[in-house]
Amino acid sequence: MRIEILTLFPGYFASPLRESLLGKAIASGLVEVVVTDLRDFATDRHRKADDEPYGGGAGMVLMAPVVAAAIEARREAVGDSGTWTVLMTPEGAPLDQQRAAALAARPRLLLVCGRYEGIDERVRELGLYDEEISLGDFVLPGGEAAALALTETVTRLVPGVVGASESLENESFLRERLDYPHYTRPREYRGKSVPDVLLSGDHARIERWRRARALEKTRQRRPDLLARRPEEPGEDDSGG
């Protein structure tokens, strides 16, 4: 899979792209991430990519000729027909696990990071974005943090990136449930013990316990998820 990122601040991504699971995926060749400076597509000697908004007001706006040229150039470089272009914006649809899975199925993504007051509306009017995505109802200084979050979310769904497929099958949100509680050594810590069921060796009982605890946590913390997928008969059986 190839992920391209257009940004005014390419240095933002330098360390994250070398670290942890994402860094390993890139090093192994399972994922390719290319970060391109939007200023490379400016036409003046000062590499100006933003300007004051027409009509007045605070802040600056990314210029349509610069952003459009960057999108079109990167699409042409990697094959326009197979590249899905995403604008990271608070106006977009919320990023969730289902949307991430759909993006992970695409061979090439082009993520466009907005900045300042946004991007000249004519880039949207020209149809240069296939999709617009948001991390949630809050404001960031720019789209870089959102692009990085999307990159990490999508990358771990690429086959071979996460070692155990079971880790992906059981994790939060995949089935509209939060994850079950996890424990590791030591068995006793500050008066708190690992639940006996996890030490029983009875895998069917452990599975029932985990399913029930996931449901319990979802009821307490994210009851809205139950509206999407109601409780199933026997789902709250704790396994004894």
Image: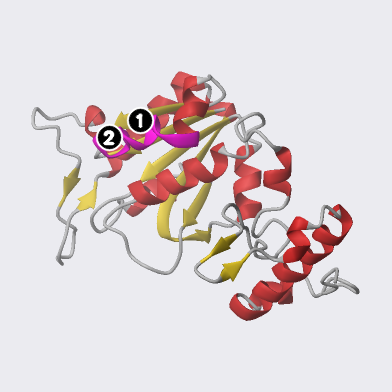
Q: Residue at x 77, y 70 (%)?
A: 212
Disc 1 crowd, CA 10 A, few/some/many (<14, 14-19, 20+): many
For residue 36, side relative to residue 195 (left or right): left
| Neighbourhood count class around disc 2 (C-alpha, 10 Å): few under 14, some 14–19, many 20 upward | some
Q: Give whichever of 190, 18 is nearer the camera.
A: 190
**Among the two numbered marks 1 and 2 on one chain, the one whose residue lies closer to the N terminus:** 2
The N terminus lies in quadrant: top right
Picture residue at 34% right of the left edge, 32% below the top: 70
Which residue is found at the position 38% from the left and 46% from the top?
A: 123
Please state which amino acid type lies under the numbered disc 1.
Val
Q: Which residue is found at the position 39% from the left and 42% from the top? A: 112
Residue at image mark 2: 10
Badge 2 marks a residue whose secondary structure is: helix
Instruction: Please give the range of residues in magenta.
Output: 11-21
Residue type at the position of mark 2: Pro
Image height of 163 relative to 168, above or below: above
Q: Nearer the viewer, residue 232 or 216?
A: 216
Specify whether 173 is left or right of 135. right
Residue receiving disc 1: 35
Residue 53 is one of the magenta-drawn residues: no
Residue reaching furthest to the right = 233
Where, quadrant-wise, is the C terminus in this rendering? Answer: bottom right
Q: Is residue 20 magenta?
A: yes
What is the chief secondary structure element of the magenta stretch? helix
How many angstroms separate mark 1 from mark 2 (CA)? 6 Å
Residue 34 position by quadrant:
top left
Q: Nearer the viewer, residue 56 or 149?
A: 149
Q: Nearer the viewer, residue 152 or 77?
A: 152
Q: Is residue 19 left or right of residue 32?
A: left
Residue 186 in the image, given as x and y percentages of width and height: 57, 54
From the top left corner, tell me how far across and down residue 2 is, in percent. 52, 27
Residue 132 placed where, x, y %? 49, 52
